[in-house]
Amino acid sequence: MSNFQLPLPIEVKEALEKLGDAGHEAWLVGGVRDLLLRREVHDWDLTTSATPEQIKAVFADYSLNLVGEKFGTVTVHYGDCFLDITTFRKEGEYKDHRHPDGVTFTKNLFDDLKRRDFTINAIVYHPEKGFRDFFCGRRDLKKRWIRAIGDADARFNQDAVRILRALRFSAVLGFDIEEKTRDAIHRNKELLLTIAPERILPEFTRMLCGRNIRYILTEFSDVIGVLIPEILPAIGFSQRSPFHQYDVWQHSVHAVAYADAVPEIRLTLFFHDLSKPGCLTVDENGRGHFYSHPKKSAAMARAIMERMKFPSKQTDLVCLLVYYHDSHPNCDADIKHLLGNVGEENFFRLLRVMEADTLAHNKWTVKKRLGQIQKLKESGERILASGECYSLKGLAITGNDLAEKGVTGQRIGALLRLALQNVILGKWENHKEVLLCELEKNNW
């Protein structure tokens, strides 16, 4: 990673020029890491010697967002970009492990960069001046590791969310975590209890969707256990089953890693077996069974997700998928019931969950089960393509039809469910006259 020209948007180049022409030092900081890794850049951040007042003066002709002004940040709507431009600053103590007691502006770039979290995030660049890399961040990018700036314990004590940021960067970038930084994460893990759920949630979700998640969930299970202590009984808990090669936790870890990097899918697999340690029964042959664990794991998932302030819609979806993750439909009627219970879109999400779950089983079971899941998919597609009825919405009659016949109250719902059951089983044709006639035989 020599001193070459990074491909910057024209808006970023012009903003740097404007600040320079006004007599201010300015550098690109947010986006440098991803540019060096040839990754897409989502956020462009500049750091500058200019004060917020001076930044506003330079960009007086542009739309400005001043929400972060007291912390030194002015957001400039520049062309197609939103540029966060922040004054060089030094921070006071972090007595609450979350926020500095105070912020003071400085003219010194080094002072600004040494307060940051990791070396790979403290590389700055200017098209004419090249790089400033006081903490060997480019070297760490080559080594593919995450390393804290200066004393790692101090970094995490300042802002404990940096612990999760380290795990998230490692998971997303596929980097290892440097030894001293790793040890400091384990030592300071309890600081995570000081962090508000709103700050934890985005880091945790992005971490879970990272390509290096198997390493993170294995190496840092004790850290995750501070946030979600419900995982701790699963670690090392034998499943006592020929179908499983891993303990409960490692099975979940591998299932998460095999899954598509979609939050709801990976969250489902993270939670899907958490209740197993409390559900174990052992038969006379010494084989373990976990009856009702999908239902109980879904309840655990709901309690955890509500505690962590996940959006209610996402919580409902994940709990639904956990509840049905161990379904084994054996015929079209079973598949229709499953479709009716989860819905069309979630049926195919559920199959993706089942596939990842299967891949984390003992190898000799995988091929057969994946074949079964493929047949489920094909049958589901056939049922949907042919327009076969699998839910109350697909019935040829409605509650209004029954009301016109004088049926009232809860009896309407009971008769509709009876009709649906018989249509799914192929006993009754899904035609209005047929259904009304059959229901009339049941005395309405």
Image (cartoon, grey):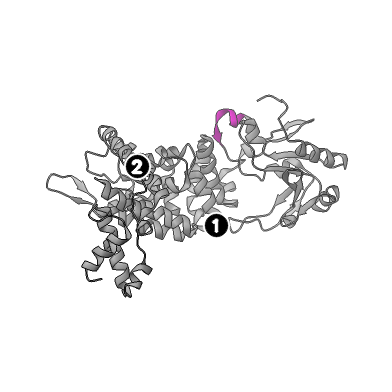
- Dot 1: element: helix
- Residue 198 marker: 1
Does residue 432 appear anywhere in the picture? yes
Which residue position is annotated with label 2?
382
**Residue reaching furthest to the right:** 22
Left or right of 308 on screen, residue 354: left
Left or right of 404 on screen, residue 443: left
As for residue 303 lying within the magenta part, the answer is no
**Residue reaching furthest to the left:** 284
Extent of the magenta region: 139-146
- Dot 2: element: helix
Among the two numbered marks 2 and 1 on one chain, the one whose residue lies closer to the N terminus? 1
The quadrant of the image that shows the C terminus is bottom left
Left or right of 291 on screen, residue 305: right
Residue at (28, 66) in percent of width and height: 415
As for residue 142 lying within the magenta part, the answer is yes
Residue at (22, 54) in percent of width and height: 427
Distance from disc 2 to disc 1, alpha carbons, whole Å, reads 43 Å
Q: Mark 2 belongs to which amino acid?
A: Arg
Q: Residues within 10 Å of mark 2 (few under 14, many from 20)?
A: few
How far across and down, in percent of the image, does residue 43 sit?
A: 66, 43
| Of 313 and 432, the residue lying toward us | 432
How far across and down, in percent of the image, does residue 338 sit?
A: 32, 51
Report the predominant secondary structure element of the magenta stretch: helix
Front tag of 2 and 1: 2
Q: Mark 1 belongs to which amino acid?
A: Glu
The quadrant of the image that shows the N terminus is top right
How far across and down, in percent of the image, does residue 435 sit?
A: 28, 61
